Image: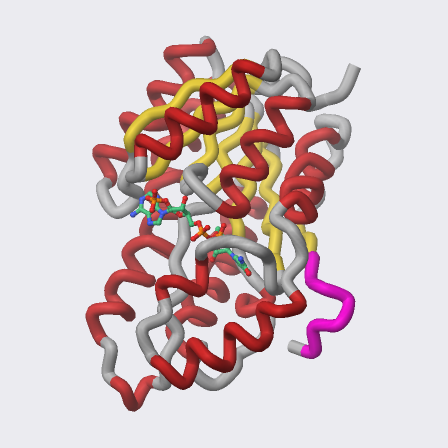
Amino acid sequence: MSNIEGKVVAITGASSGIGESAARHLAKKGARVVLGARRTDKLEKIVKEIRAEGGTAEFRPLDVTSRESVDDFVQFAEKTFGKLDVVVNNAGLMPLSPLEALKVDEWDRMVDVNIKGVLYGIAAGLPIMKRQGHGQFINISSVAGHKVFPSGAVYCGTKFAVNAISEGLRAENADIRVTVVSPGATESELADTITHGETRAMIDQLRELAIPAQAIADAIGFAIEQPDNVDVNEIIVRPTAQPL
Ligand SMILES: NC(=O)c1ccc[n+]([C@@H]2O[C@H](COP(=O)([O-])OP(=O)(O)OC[C@H]3O[C@@H](n4cnc5c(N)ncnc54)[C@H](OP(=O)(O)O)[C@@H]3O)[C@@H](O)[C@H]2O)c1
């Protein structure tokens, strides 16, 4: 039996891209998945399709910028299925721009979703996992959490923060597994959040190399299916030809 089967996995940002792909993939492997995001019409459709293929899935409206909403989402997963094995902190946005453009509202938004959203996911899941004596966080970072590039100062900063927070979480908790998955260019809606024209053109060109979101879902599945005493802490998955 796979070490994914029967696990309860709550996934933030599951209405498109990597989160959606992870939900479909893990459900196929027998996980009971709980999908959260703001676009509930999309979640409803994905859940219906997962169930039609024999999977077990639920959804709940979620805004990761609200601590109450994240608590409600994670508690919903535990109450519905009686336990919580994995939280995938995946929700994120990437409105890249040079600092000089002073898109301060977008900086705020990235800090709120990419950093605080992950912290709220930890705050909601950690007490449950400590009570159970086991659990796993999978935090989605980026190659931008390893390298800083022009127009990426704030986005990279948020992803470096995800790496640091994840390492602290790991070091403090001998009973909890912590995995950082860092994708390179991956097919999704992420570039749609870029409002700076020149940067969007540069990223659109880079994204011609993009790999399917399934490649990241596979990495998430790999980290979950390891034996309980094996903690895969970091995975970088990028297109072979991606220079950055
Ligand atoms: N695609 C890439 O090339 C790439 C590379 C490196 C890292 N990543 C990371 O991968 C993660 C997933 O992104 P993606 O590429 O799959 O992009 P995506 O298709 O745009 O998905 C982003 C998801 O985050 C959700 N989200 C955004 N704001 C939210 C909020 N306030 N509350 C709850 N959910 C929210 C969106 O759902 P709603 O809009 O419905 O709320 C959506 O489901 C992000 O953390 C991103 O930084 C992606």
Q: Residue at x 52, y 73 (%)?
A: 204
Q: Quadrant of residue 192?
A: bottom left
How are the colours assigned in the image? secondary structure
Above-or-below relation of 88 to 7: below
Q: Nearer the viewer, residue 69 or 179?
A: 69
Left or right? Give the position of 160 relative to 232: left
Residue 214 drawn at (x, y percent): 66, 43
Above-or-below relation of 122 to 156: above
Q: Residue at x 24, y 83 (%)?
A: 102
Left or right? Give the position of 161 relative to 205: left
Check if residue 35 falls in the magenta segment.
no
Residue 130 drawn at (x, y percent): 48, 25
What's the magenta bit mostly, secondary-structure-wise? loop
Above-or-below relation of 238 to 41: below
Q: Nearer the viewer, residue 74 or 51?
A: 51
Q: Residue at x 70, y 72 (%)?
A: 242
Q: Quadrant of residue 29?
A: top right
Q: Residue at x 42, y 19 (%)?
A: 58
Residue 57 drawn at (x, y percent): 49, 18
Count of numbered tags? 0
Residue 61 drawn at (x, y percent): 29, 30
Left or right? Give the position of 227 relative to 53: right
Image quarter hosting the N terminus:
top right
Q: Quadrant of residue 52?
A: top right
The magenta segment: 237-243
Image quarter hosting the C terminus:
bottom right
